[in-house]
Image (cartoon, rainbow, N blue to C red):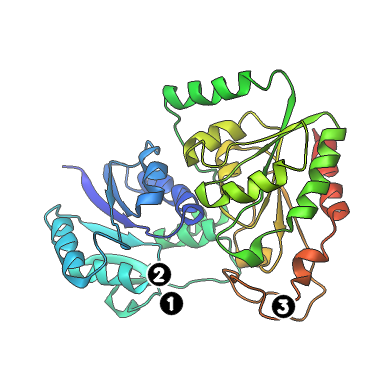
Amino acid sequence: MSRRILVIQTAFPGDAILTLPFIQKLCEFYNDALIDVVCIPSTAEIFLSSSYVNNVIVLDKRKKHKNIFSLLKFAMRLKKNNYQKVYSPHRSFRSSLLVLLSGIKDSTGFDISAMSFIYKNKIRYENKLHEVQRNLSLLGNNNYIKNWQILPEIKIEVDSVRKVDSYLKNIGNQKLAAIAPGSVWQTKKYPEEHYSEIIKYLINNDFYVILIGGTSDAETCERIMSGFDKGVSTTANLFSIVESIELLKNCEILICNDSAPTHMAMCADIPVVTIYCSTIPSFGFYPYNKKSVFVSYDELKCKPCGIHGHHKCPVSTFECGLNLSPAAVIKKIEELILQK
């Protein structure tokens, strides 16, 4: 019989994408394994699009499974699946509680996880490593950690390809550049006026610019697009995450904040310039394919002000974003374009 393994990852889309290399190597480590994933509704499509995942189990922690009784019922459902092992890259209290309630004895998690004492195998969380490396360390195999630059694999359904192709036909045969100006955190968002300067540069260099993002990014993208008569369009709230990855495969470059689109570009394996405002690359979430770079204004005592960013600048200046000039970003873009 195949070994049944559960992976719990209930974090945001970027974290979900960075879990895929771990799942890919987990399949290699246990070549007889059937791997199920517990995730949140917004990341289900990511794991459903992985050929390495057997089954996706959605935990709606904000609604359906919000209280302890519904979580217990959810855990009992997991228990019936008779998993031999469970891995939890996510370090939250809820994830650890789910591991405990599921009754899976052979459990692996990080030593800084909430309730880390419940894990049979506690792995040291290394701050200096990339998140992909940290996730791979859960396997306990140093070879995987050393050879960690594994691109996340996403399979795109035919209908999604056709939807993107239909959109691109309306643009015509032009060089495409994508920009993702949004983020959950305001202090991660590079100023819109700076992005507008970058778009001007791209248009002047014969690029057609596509603004990408989710529902929450639609207003930002519309505002930026409204400053141009032509050469720019927005797909915010038009394409899903997986469809946006397919769109990126048709682009020559992506410029974005320290957010999920950086990792989507790793799936598409295209050049990306990631802009760091309040956060820093050494947190371990930088782009890592051979075609990408990042840019950051670091001459500030207040930076970084938090690993996730904030809804408002703690010192009310936002110098980390405002002082990072469009010219500095354009220089990085030119480096990547010239490399091609």
Label located before the other in sequence (2 or 3): 2
Percent position (x, y) of residue 97?
A: 26, 72
Q: Secondary structure at mark 3?
A: loop
Residue 2 image label? none
- 306 versus 31 height, above or below: below
- Which residue matches tag 1? 112
Q: Residue at x 57, y 56 (%)?
A: 146
Q: Three-letter amino acid code at disc 3?
A: Ser
Q: Residue at x 28, y 51 (%)?
A: 58
- Which residue matches tag 3? 316
- 205 versus 45 height, above or below: above
Q: Quadrant of the C terminus?
A: top right
Residue nearest the viewer, comparing 91 with 169: 169
- 44 versus 253 height, above or below: below
Residue 91 image label? 2
Q: Secondary structure at mark 2?
A: loop
Q: Secondary structure at mark 1?
A: loop
User: Does the residue at mark 2 contact the one at mark 1 (Cβ under 8 Å)?
Assistant: yes
Q: Residue at x 71, y 81 (%)?
A: 315
